Amino acid sequence: MGEQVALYPPLIEDLSRFYKNRDRSPIHPDRPIDHKITEENIIDITQATIVDASGKEIAISFIYDGTPRGLSGENLYKFQKFTNKISEHNSIKNHISEKSIRKISQDYIRELYLKKNKTEFGEIIEKYFSENVQKQKIFIPVKGLRIDGELKFGSSTITTFSNSIMSNFEELVHKLPNADRNHGFLQKLRKNFLGRSVLIFHLEAEEIRAFEIAEERSERYLSLLHYWSAPILIFNITSHVAPADLRPWPSLLRLAFSKDSAQMNDSLIPPMWEMDLSFEIISHYEKFGLHVLSILSDKQENSFQEHLMRSILFYGRSAYHIDPSDKLLQITTAFEMLALKNSTEPIGSLGADRLAFAISNDPKIRQDIVKNFKRVYGLRSRRTHHGHDIKHEEEISKYMHNIWQFMFYSLRHWDKYTSHDEFIDNLENMRYGH
């Protein structure tokens, strides 16, 4: 890695062209500063990221000898690929964030350019690792979820932030330096966490990376848990059960003026659906693949399991669509991902047949499933291509239930196939009576 990083200092260039048309005197048009920033005002080498109108990064720069210097164009692209490669390395990705790796790399290249660096790049990474990576216990609060006791799912524990957990925190905080100053922290903790459902993760990482991993897994786990939820099967119900503030709760903001008054009102739009993980419901979920989904949520052993997880995750996220038509489009896409080998296979015939043969042995029921599928898929196509509203809720409800059964069929056979093609071949054999 060190040898690769050492290639970048010679590529550093004068970036003055990016600053020619920029008025750098005011910080903000409404808050102009009354003095110039000169070299004497700069107490350290400054770094900046330059973006274009779309927000895409086009250069990284630092000031040296009064001139902005750095990487842009192809050189910046190579640098980004390099930092991404480091961040994806097995020994790094679960412990240090890409942002941290990028900053370490930028600092190292800059110091090499200024001929101030005498430490090997690998040593800097190791030092950063030893100083910042430690065991972290991360709590992610969840809106709209009720749970009895606790549920182990993936690498998390889903439970309620109880009084006993709060007491443990108070005990820990009182042992910290300046304990008197931490009273405000405990008040905020009690207000925002006590009584709320949380996902708990035990991770060994720097703080920022631990939060990134916990938030990404929380979103994924809750999307997968929607596999059993009402919003998956009921056309007009939307779920907002997600890590707190990750998914916006729909609101209606209204502003009214008349000659006598001005009124503004902000309110949540009903109906809201909550996920219930009581002991009875968890026991029911266990019969329909909860344990399997928990195993597969973090680790897949072969290409079929990877394909299955991508499809079910896409399927679960359909629960978040406020527009029922958008929900139907995503559910259908999730089915296509799993039921077709590729985009050239006709879903109207092959997809319908594979669905029918997977979920029923009765010829008459199979015929009804195929008819229903073609009917609803036609509605979906008119929405996609012509913008028509989707109605016929009874037909769509049957369709959604059939898709759920197909997903369950696939989940039940999670350890039977090693590839997606093998799974499809089995469905084809069923169609032809093999």
Image (tube, rainbow, N blue to C red):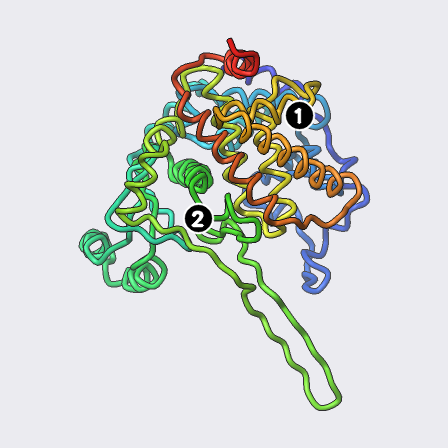
Q: Residue at x 34, y 44 (%)?
A: 199
User: 276 above or below 287?
Assistant: below
Residue 127 marker: none
Nearer-the-camera pick, 356 or 144 = 356
Residue extending farthest to the top is 434
Q: Quadrant of residue 143?
A: bottom left
- Foreground disc of the pair 1, 2: 1
Mark 1 sits on what residue? 347
Q: Nearer the viewer, residue 152 or 409?
A: 409
Which is nearer the eye, 15 or 91?
91
Residue 243 badge: 2
Q: Is residue 195 visible?
A: yes
Amino acid type assigned to the residue bearing label 2 in the image: Pro
**Which residue is rendered at x = 46% and y = 25% of the image?**
410
The answer to whether the residue labelled 1 contacts the one labelled 2, judged by CB atoms less than 8 Å apart, is: no
Question: Dot 2, crowdedness within 10 Å: few (<14), some or many (≥20)?
Answer: many
